[in-house]
Image: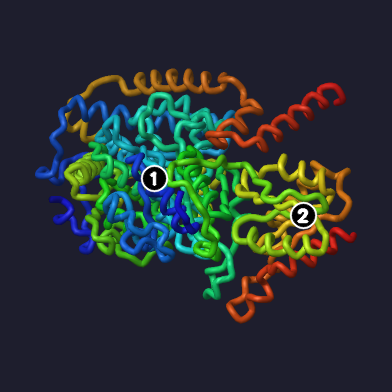
Amino acid sequence: MIFKTFNPLEDKTLRIIDNDGKIINKELFPDLDNETVIKAYKSMLYARTADEMAISYQRQGRMYTYPPNMGQEAIHIASGLIMRENDWLVPAFRELGAMLAKGVSMKEIFIYYMGNEQGSNFKQANHVLPICVPIGSQFLHATGIGYSINYQKKDEVVFSFIGDGGTSEGDFSEALNFAGVWKVPVIYIIQNNQYAISVPVQNQTKSINLAVKAVAFGLPGIKVDGNDFFAMYVACKEAFEHARAGEGAVLIEALTYRKGAHTTSDDPTKYRTKEEEQEWDKTDPLIRMKRYIDNEGIWNEDEEKLIENYKQEIDKQFTEAENITPYQLEDVFEYMYDEMPDILRKQKAEYKQFQSWKEKRI
Amino acid sequence: MSVMTIVQAINNALDIKLGEDKTIVVYGEDAGKEGGVFRVTEGLQRKYGVERVFDSPLAESAIVGTGLGMALSGLRPIVELQFDGFTYPAFNQIISNVSRMHNRSRGMYKVPLVIRFPYGGGINALEHHSESPEALYAHIPGIKVVIPSTPHDAKGLLISAIESNDPVIFMEPKRIYRAIKQEVSEEKFSIPIGKAKVLTEGTNVTVVAFGAMIRECQKAIAMANQAGISVELIDLRTIYPIDKETIAESIKKTGRIIIVAEAPESFGVGAELMAIANEEAFLYLEAPPKRVMGFDTIVPMAKGEPFYLITPERIFYEIERTVKF
């Protein structure tokens, strides 16, 4: 029972491999075959590549504001590995790898950040909510879905994400409080990437860590090295078993570092130092996992060639996203309601009249 | 048929829907064992069990936010917020998520959620218990706002709200919760959302109101009739989507419109109805449209409330002025 061993009140951190990829906690090392480990590493590599390309497309002016994920891939891929098809993903907006794991495509992600809501109508992904921008509010949706699952006696689990800044929102506490009372099968994951835009986590709370907040709600909480894929996997796996067994919700604090900016509109050099970034670079989840793989000697593919293939495939998806049917006037109105009020129909018709006037007169 | 108050009619609608649809759950503060502070959900927990009708912890944002989560995952939740003035903690969930999830997901997720709460003044209550925030909610794209004025309408409109796949804010006029009794069918029936109702036909002036103000208007109209003025009374029933046609048609007939509502006057439903009068019936107007509404103040506590409350006399006064303009 890792939630007892790694008591957040004692500020303990679950860590399984060190920065050199060496196993430091053999007992807890997960029972994963080499093939799965390599697949997980490749998924992290794919997510990192896609993220870098998204930033580059944004800089080329082919996409709008985008929130980079670099540095947080272990959290996304480890949780994504555990999520089953019918499990729910209730994201904030920095969970790219987890969304990909659930079946969301890069094409859809690109469509969204090109400024088209159509990117949130996931064609292949089951039980994934659109990204939720109002900070922290998504945690309550996860709790409600948890109630549904219990009520309908379904074998499903919810994974929901929030940032360190989000833990200051009232909805965070309300969601965990309801979760405790209702005993919902929800895994709440805090991605503590150290900053809420420019504000460091030390300015968010005087708690010794964020996982400890679970204690007040009667839930298990655990602080995990979120840049250690194996630690994240073990924590999510145990939380998943706990939730699935009807034992209720778990709060996981995943320590990580946002390598990039909050979004492409932000400049982190204004509020953090190079030294700090370099210090965290040593914990980069991809480097650590690659070192583990090299130490074990279980993989010898040409990584550069693999990345090249990923780039081609991602670029193809980007081109497809650029070439979807252009946004129509109808799309503005069509989805506001399941049953559209006449008022909206009239507003649309009036705009069309203006359009035809404009064609003739201007 | 049986004689029901608004409270009983709402209870009856909830009872019918809970009975026929297992995906419906009802919850809120004190909504379970006690049956709500106004006893609207009384007896339902005993009948349908604690999993379906229950007391939630006390947090409005969470009541609505979790309701949204349930609506996205196969349930049709009906949540109760205890008073108009306590709905504001839930405002962010309503405006940022409940109203948008259908659009945000391009129709992938529907939101069959009903948010019920009592509203309005006239019960000598403490601060926060006498407010009429319908304009705040009607201004949010993506939701519908319904306010009944009779037991019959309360039942039929609530059944429509529950069966709607769009989120509905259902505001209940607490002042007349038990003041009006009416024969209501015990069978299931529904009244469409978005349709106003002409309660009394008349020729000199149109009066538009909703909720608890209908009864006050009816008293004013009796006075006006004695003075030889013929008044057409329209019960709006749905605030959004507002029934422009019924309003415009009536103005075209009478040439005059007065709007009666309890909320602060500026930027409220009255302003919207005046806009409809101007846009849809400008050439028919024979007098300036007039609002008889609350002041742009906080609803005063009991000792001051008589100044704020709209009385039949005040409505009659404005009817006479408008007709004589």
Of badges 1 and 2, the one in the foreground is 2
x and y percent of residue B228 in the render? 83, 60
Say which quarter of the image contains residue B120. Answer: bottom right
Q: Residue furthest bottom?
A: B303
- State left or right for residue A199 relative to residue A184: right
Residue B16: numbered disc: 1
Does residue A271 appear in this view? yes
* Residue that appears at 43% across and 48% down: B13
Q: How many marks do you count on the picture?
A: 2
Quadrant, the C terminus of chain B: bottom right
* Residue that appears at 53% across and 44% down: B99
Q: What residue type is labelled 1?
A: Ile
- State left or right for residue A51 relative to residue A305: right
In the image, B271 versus B201, the foreground residue is B201
Q: Which amino acid does label 2 sit on?
A: Val
In the image, A62 versus B251, the foreground residue is B251
Neighbour class for label 2 at 10 Å: few (<14), some, many (≥20)?
many
* Residue that appears at 64% across and 79% down: B304
The residue beneath circle 2 is B231
Q: Which chain carries label 1?
A: B
Residues marked 1 and 2, same chain: yes
Q: How far apart are marks 1 and 2 (CA)?
A: 37 Å
Say which quarter of the image contains residue B313. Answer: bottom right
Relative to B297, does residue A254 appear above or below in the rendering? above
